[in-house]
Amino acid sequence: QVQLVESGGGLVQPGGSLRLSCAASGFTVSTAAMSWYRQAPGKKRELVAAITRTAGTTNYADSVKGRFTISRDNAKNTVDLQMNSLKAEDTAVYYCKANRPSRDPYWGQGTQVTVSS
């Protein structure tokens, strides 16, 4: 059974850092295109960062370039999002998504990130 479980969210001050982790089960993360999305209250869910399957090429939303880093740990079967220099506007629920070939996309349950002093 496919499952994605996000962790690592919490409350952090502006300028601080958090590391989110998405633990996958039921499939291997290197065989899927993995991504992190976020959704702030009253706003649409938006793509934050993505990593392609196999080659591991990454791309980022302009708003997080230079501050966030997505990475994949094949041994742990996780995809992490390192978030530095956090801003109030990064406050949102962060979701992990898996796109596997010929399968419907799968989402995790989300983890709350709050950036506030």
Image (cartoon, rainbow, N blue to C red):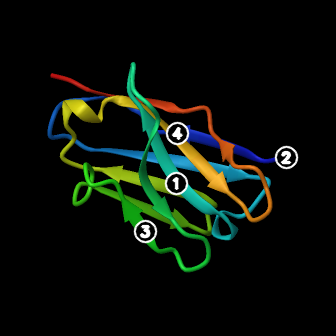
Q: Nearer the viewer, residue 117 or 110?
A: 110
Sequence order check, earlier mark of 4 and 3: 3
The residue shown at (39%, 20%) is 41
Q: Amino acid at mark 3?
A: Thr
Above or below — where is 17 with respect to 103? above
| Disc 3 residue crowd, few under 14, some 14–19, many 20+, Cα 10 Å | some
Q: How many numbered marks have been drawn onto this rendered protein structure?
A: 4
Residue identifier under label 3:
58
Give yes or no for contact between labels 4 and 3 (Cβ–Cβ under 8 Å).
no
Circle 2: element type: loop
Question: Residue 14 sits in which quadrant?
Answer: top left
Residue identifier under label 2:
1
Question: Residue 10 sits in which quadrant?
Answer: top left
Task: Measure the alpha-carbon separation of dots 3 and 1.
Answer: 9 Å
Give yes or no for contact between labels 2 and 3 (Cβ–Cβ under 8 Å).
no
Residue 35's tag is 1
Left or right, 12 with reference to 38: left
Which marked residue is nearer to the observer: mark 1 or mark 2?
1
Q: From the image, which quarter does the C terminus lie in?
A: top left
